[in-house]
């Protein structure tokens, strides 16, 4: 007797169903991952292009880009954006924090005055950063720390390339 092949159509339909579901998942992921509003991230204003004195690429591949970020006291980092989410790492030794003015693309300003923190031996401070639309940053002052001391310890921004 010949074995029946009644399971062959069932297997084919399962494979086709899995392929259809997989394609749908990929399509929705693509729409999510690449669905940013491009008006918030115009061409030519990427941090590395718009602010090359303060943002330098020290590593890049298809998944991440690592930036060395230096913010000199008394100057303004020009208008730029960061289109990818990232981790921001800075070496924190305590003491007075910088006085920072953060200007957004819509003209609003967030002013963060300096305040004293207890001095300690030093530790890495890690902060999660969502994509940042157009902004500029001004470091007004850094009381108690010399520019020479700060120039040796740049911040690192590790951008995760999941969105364009």
Image (cartoon, rainbow, N blue to C red):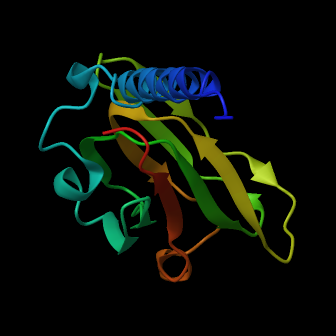
Quadrant of residue 114 within the rendered picture: top right
Quadrant of residue 103 within the rendered picture: top left
Q: Is residue 13 above or below residue 132?
A: above
Residue 126 picture location, percent across and down: 69, 55
Residue 98 picture location, percent across and down: 58, 52
Q: Residue at x 59, y 52 (%)?
A: 87
Q: Is residue 59 above or below residue 113?
A: below
Q: Nearer the viewer, residue 98 or 43?
A: 43
Q: Is residue 71 above or below residue 17?
A: below
Any part of residue 69 in sight:
no
Image quarter in which the N terminus is found: top right
Residue 55 picture location, percent across and down: 33, 62
Q: Nearer the viewer, residue 137 or 17?
A: 17
Q: Is residue 38 left or right of residue 44?
A: right
Any part of residue 78 in sight:
yes
Q: Is residue 119 left or right of residue 35?
A: right
Residue 95 picture location, percent across and down: 76, 62
The residue furthest front is 1
The residue furthest left is 44
Q: Residue at x 38, y 17 (%)?
A: 108
Q: Nearer the viewer, residue 38 or 135?
A: 38
* Total number of numbered discs in the rendering: 0
Q: Is residue 18 left or right of residue 69?
A: right
Image quarter in which the C terminus is found: top left
Q: Residue at x 42, y 60 (%)?
A: 73
Q: Residue at x 56, y 28 (%)?
A: 8
Q: Is residue 47 above or below residue 40?
A: below
Q: Is residue 81 left or right of residue 144?
A: left
């Amino acid at each position: 007797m010949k074995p029946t092949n009644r399971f062959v159509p069932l297997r084919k339909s399962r494979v086709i169903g899995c392929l259809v579901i997989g394609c749908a998942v990929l399509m929705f992921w693509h729409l999510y991952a690449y669905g940013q509003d491009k008006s918030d991230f115009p061409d030519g204003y990427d941090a590395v292009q718009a602010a090359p004195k303060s943002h330098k690429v020290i590593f890049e591949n298809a998944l991440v880009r690592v930036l060395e970020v230096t913010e000199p006291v008394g100057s303004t980092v020009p208008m730029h954006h960061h289109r990818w989410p990232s981790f921001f790492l800075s070496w924190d030794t305590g003491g007075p924090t910088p006085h920072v003015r953060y200007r957004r693309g819509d003209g609003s300003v967030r002013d963060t005055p300096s305040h004293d923190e207890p001095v300690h031996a030093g530790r890495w401070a890690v902060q999660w950063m969502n994509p940042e639309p157009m902004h500029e940053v001004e470091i007004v002052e850094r009381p108690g720390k010399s520019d020479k001391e700060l120039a040796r310890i740049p911040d690192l921004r590790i951008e995760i390339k999941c969105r364009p």
